[in-house]
Amino acid sequence: MECTILGAGVSGLSCAIELLKSKIDVKILSKGRSPNTVSDIAAAVWYPFLVEPVVKTDKWSVETYYELIKLMNDFPESGISMRKGREYLRDKREPPGWSEDIKHFRILEIGEIPDEYIFGWEFEVPVIEMQKYMPWLESRVFSLGGTIEEMSFDRIDDVEENMIINCTGLGAREICNDLELVPVRGQVLYLDQDPIIGHFDQQKETLAYTIPRSDVTVLGGTAQMDDYTEIPREEDSEEILRKCELMWPDLDREKIIGIGVGLRPSRNELRLEYEHVNDKHIIHNYGHGGAGVTLSWGCATEVMRLIRMHMPS
Ligand SMILES: Cc1cc2nc3c(=O)[nH]c(=O)nc-3n(C[C@H](O)[C@H](O)[C@H](O)COP(=O)(O)OP(=O)(O)OC[C@H]3O[C@@H](n4cnc5c(N)ncnc54)[C@H](O)[C@@H]3O)c2cc1C
């Protein structure tokens, strides 16, 4: 059996590896490749953010959590490490559904919460350096026998092959005419200073995070719906710094060394389903919002399950 995967972001590459490991031949066709995908901009911390439906995404996230830990141990060069982070809240609420499934999660003591906030929790999760992880994923595809070819499609019907896994991220808006899929713009700053522990305000309206990696600390963020501007904005940088300083007063603005912008592929619910149309067997896997890395392996496993269920062998 051979499958054609459209897209070489984290979703397409993870699916490719999952299929190749199941002895399915894989050819990836993609308009762009690392380092020019949205996945390359991801911060990237394991955290289910801006993605629905929670009943499914919690399960796929937890599967990915354990796969990332396994990869960290088996392939240290993949750029994955475990980091502690603290999420702060302005009201008291129930812990997220995934809290019981990860290795370390606890409610914060009052003295551990910055002044602006009243509640919060600490977790330990994988942090993924995408500038190492994306090339590593590509090399894993090649070593398992897969190929990647640069090719762009206007419509999914233009793809000649008839067994297709559609991992085109925001590109699916055009090729599938899926107008439910919209960009949620994210701007980040890179800082040469380590906060030791990550700080998070994950509410969409007040979004702020400081994610320590071995190379830089990523400061975010913005979540601007239906905004296609890929050029950084000065006012967004200022707002990111203001929000991050509330959680991390020691942040040193002199140590900013870079800036990035990406358009998250956002949908009311991510699309992961089989479709049989015009003699083509298609599995759609797009619309992962702010959690494409967090969901990558769980979704790849689900793609594999749908292949076994629907695709002719
Ligand atoms: C600032 C920012 C921070 C983020 N932080 C995190 C984080 O901490 N954790 C996390 O889990 N997620 C994070 N995300 C979200 C994450 O980056 C996305 O959910 C993820 O990258 C989506 O991956 P994807 O492979 O589906 O799409 P993409 O990475 O966009 O890949 C799509 C692929 O399809 C190809 N393609 C598109 N159109 C066509 C076409 N017409 N024909 C052929 N090929 C096509 C593209 O070239 C590309 O290769 C962040 C995003 C941003 C912007």
Image (spheres, rainbow, N blue to C red):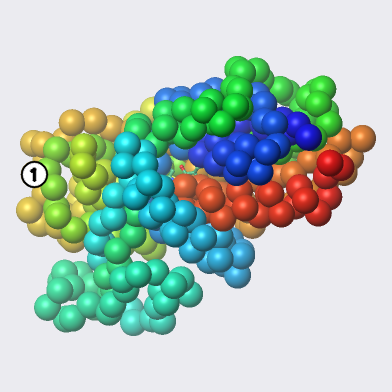
The three-letter amino acid code for the residue at tag 1 is: Asp
Name the image quarter holding the N terminus. Answer: top right
Q: Picture coordinates of residue 137 (x, y %)?
A: 47, 34
Name the image quarter holding the C terminus. Answer: top right
Q: Picture coordinates of residue 67 (x, y %)?
A: 46, 54
Q: Picture coordinates of residue 234 (x, y %)?
A: 27, 34
The correct choice, above or below, for 93 with respect to 165 in the image is: below
The correct choice, above or below, for 233 with respect to 251 in the image is: above
Q: Is residue 99 visible?
A: yes
Report the residue marked by disc 1: 252
Extreme residue in the right direction = 278
Q: Residue at x 47, y 47 (%)?
A: 293
Residues packed near mark 1 inside 10 Å, few (<14), some (14 to 19) or many (20 plus): few
Q: Is residue 248 left or right of residue 106?
A: left
Q: Residue at x 33, y 59 (%)?
A: 125
Q: Is residue 309 left or right of residue 206?
A: right
Give the camera-side residue of 221 and 197.
197
Q: Residue at x 81, y 54 (%)?
A: 309
Q: Is residue 169 left or right of residue 215?
A: right
Give the camera-side residue of 306 and 43.
306
Q: Is residue 102 left or right of residue 191?
A: right
SS for callout 1? loop
